[in-house]
Image (tube, rainbow, N blue to C red):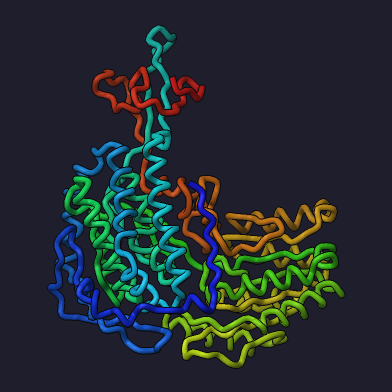
């Protein structure tokens, strides 16, 4: 399944059904899910914030205790022994059932989402669709069966001087996985988002550390996962959801010996801390962290001469999309000094100044954005091209654009940092050589974009190579916001954009974070997994003696 996921916020989509809250508020208990059991043994409670109203929501959530974390981990361990034996088709049915149960939650789920995020209803419905689409895409992958990467090398006992053993390899699940809900995607990168869907597809039970900003949304989605597990006969403990406002519960999860892998989307500081925790365990485990990215855009002169005004309009919308709270928002635009870049900068500033200020996810995120933006506005050498001064709501993110020279950018490392929100920086490089130097100074990024006429590309091959070496996805004449959910998508990049550039958190290949290869040597046919038996009973694509076949 291919899903183009592009959030385009419309003013008339801000309608809320929250006035009907009393009809469904009972659906939110504020408790943790320890498998199918609802539990609230702790004494620490908290509430979520409605950022549009700038007030607390009514629901109260109980933070998980260490004992509840242990209970969830124990259940996950017990569930793994059963769940890993489930067939691909059985796990596929489970994933499809999760999507159906999420859909069945209806308007109450949309209302919880909008009340906790400040995001419009249209965005909520689009993201719910993506989430269900991801679940169904992994279900389709399982039903096809080829993902196990079955590889067979037949033995030859007549070979001299030493006989060749019969070797057969496939991927197997690693064990229970901890998933940290993301702040900026309450559905698609949270409770039943891509990390959870891929781990469940692989055969790994999941314990979610719910994001405290959207705990009600997380509880409703958790109820859907649990209901789907019960309907499809999955073991108790295949999924748990833990509430936590602080960091101790997350740390305990990563350190817990039952956990064999971690999925995280968030800040560089938090991601690096979790990676270190995983590495320092007696049994080190991988932490697949998606962290910061400013997504550099290289704009070449001929493209700006031909279509600079159009590109300025497109990039103003991309910078401000979702109040700049996408991991792929273009935070850095690089070009070579000249009339074309000067004109482009003026058009970009004018278009950005006309962009509406959108509500940000939380007062703390809004405060951090305004602080980070102001540091950039005040930095030595920066020229303010555009900054919105007015906003309708207390937590609205006001777009801004600054310009610096390549010289100033190279000497001030602070200018390289991400400002999470509708902010971007235009870097005016003195020459192609300096443009290349700037690119080589950048840290790893999720995306890089090239705006160019095809006729000028050949003269910038070294620039393109430098850009490619810094990113996981490179775009030609496009904007980086909007991630296509399909097998060819790679949503990951060199450190610190992610902790391991070889893996993606979007698309079918996300499943390979949660599996490991095992080789069977000289095993009797009747004892082999079906994926490795002669005759190919599953009818999957396999590599047999060096050739890919389905026979």
Q: Nearer the viewer, residue 424 or 461?
A: 424
Residue 284 appears anywhere in the view? no
Q: Quadrant of residue 410?
A: bottom right
Please report the residue visible at 33 percent of the width from the left and 74 percent of the height from the top.
112
Horizontal arrangement in the rendering, residue 182 relative to residue 317 (left or right): left
Residue 232 appears anywhere in the view? yes
Say which quadrant the C terminus sits in. top left
Vertical placement of residue 437 versus 134, above or below = below
Vertical placement of residue 535 versus 183, above or below = above
Vertical placement of residue 11 versus 135, above or below = below
Residue 209 place in picture, x, y as percent: 30, 66
Residue 245 place in picture, x, y as percent: 29, 77
Please report the residue visible at 66 percent of the width from the left and 56 percent of the height from the top.
475
Q: Nearer the viewer, residue 231 or 177?
A: 231
Horizontal arrangement in the rendering, residue 402 relative to residue 203 (left or right): right
Please report the residue visible at 19 percent of the width from the left and 71 percent of the height from the top.
31
Residue 494 place in picture, x, y as percent: 55, 57
């Amino acid at each position: 399944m291919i899903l183009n996921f592009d959030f385009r916020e419309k003013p008339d989509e801000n309608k809320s059904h929250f006035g009907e809250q009393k009809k469904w508020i009972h659906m939110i208990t504020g408790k943790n899910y320890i498998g199918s059991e609802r539990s609230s043994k702790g004494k620490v409670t908290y509430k979520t914030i409605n950022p549009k109203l700038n007030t607390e929501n009514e629901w109260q959530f109980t933070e998980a205790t260490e004992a509840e974390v242990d209970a969830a981990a124990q259940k996950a361990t017990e569930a793994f022994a059963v769940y890993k034996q489930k067939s691909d088709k059985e796990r596929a049915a489970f994933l499809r059932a999760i999507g159906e149960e999420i859909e069945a939650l209806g308007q109450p789920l949309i209302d919880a989402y909008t009340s906790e995020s400040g995001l419009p209803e249209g965005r909520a419905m689009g993201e719910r669709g993506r989430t269900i689409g991801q679940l169904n895409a992994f279900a389709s992958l399982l039903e096809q069966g080829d993902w196990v990467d079955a590889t067979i090398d037949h033995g030859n006992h007549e070979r001299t001087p030493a006989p060749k053993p019969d070797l057969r390899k496939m991927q197997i699940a690693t064990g229970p996985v901890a998933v940290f809900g993301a702040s900026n995607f309450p559905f698609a990168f949270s409770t039943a988002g891509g990390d959870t869907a891929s781990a469940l597809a692989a055969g790994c039970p999941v314990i979610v550390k719910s994001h405290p900003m959207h705990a009600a949304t997380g509880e409703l989605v958790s109820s859907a996962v649990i209901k789907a597990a019960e309907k499809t006969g999955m073991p108790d403990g295949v999924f748990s959801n833990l509430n936590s406002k602080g960091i101790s519960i997350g740390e305990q999860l990563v350190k817990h010996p039952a956990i064999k892998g971690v999925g995280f989307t968030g800040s560089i500081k938090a991601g690096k801390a979790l990676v270190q925790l995983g590495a320092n365990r007696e049994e080190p485990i991988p932490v697949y962290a998606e962290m910061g990215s400013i997504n550099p855009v290289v704009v070449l002169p001929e493209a700006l001469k031909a279509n600079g005004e159009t590109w300025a309009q497109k990039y103003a919308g991309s910078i401000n999309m979702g109040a700049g709270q996408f991991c792929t928002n273009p935070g850095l635009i690089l070009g070579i000094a000249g009339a074309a870049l000067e004109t482009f900068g003026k058009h970009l500033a004018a278009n950005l100044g006309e962009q509406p200020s959108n509500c940000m996810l939380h007062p703390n995120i809004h405060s951090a954005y305004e602080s980070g933006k102001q540091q950039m506005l005040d930095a030595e050498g920066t020229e303010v091209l555009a900054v919105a001064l007015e906003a309708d709501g207390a937590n609205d993110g006001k777009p801004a654009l600054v310009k610096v020279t390549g010289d100033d950018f190279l000497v001030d490392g602070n200018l390289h940092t991400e400002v999470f929100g509708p902010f971007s920086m235009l870097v005016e490089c003195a020459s192609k050589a300096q443009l290349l130097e700037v690119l080589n100074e950048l840290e790893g990024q999720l995306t890089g974009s090239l705006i160019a006429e095809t006729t000028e590309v050949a003269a910038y091959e070294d620039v393109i190579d430098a850009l490619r070496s810094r990113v996981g996805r490179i775009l030609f004449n496009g904007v980086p916001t909007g991630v296509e959910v399909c097998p060819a998508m790679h949503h990951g990049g060199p450190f610190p954009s992610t902790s391991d550039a070889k893996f993606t958190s979007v698309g079918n290949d996300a499943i390979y974070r949660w599996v490991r290869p095992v080789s069977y040597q000289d095993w009797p046919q009747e004892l082999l997994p079906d994926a490795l038996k002669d005759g190919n009973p599953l009818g999957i694509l396999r590599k047999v003696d060096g050739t890919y076949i389905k026979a």
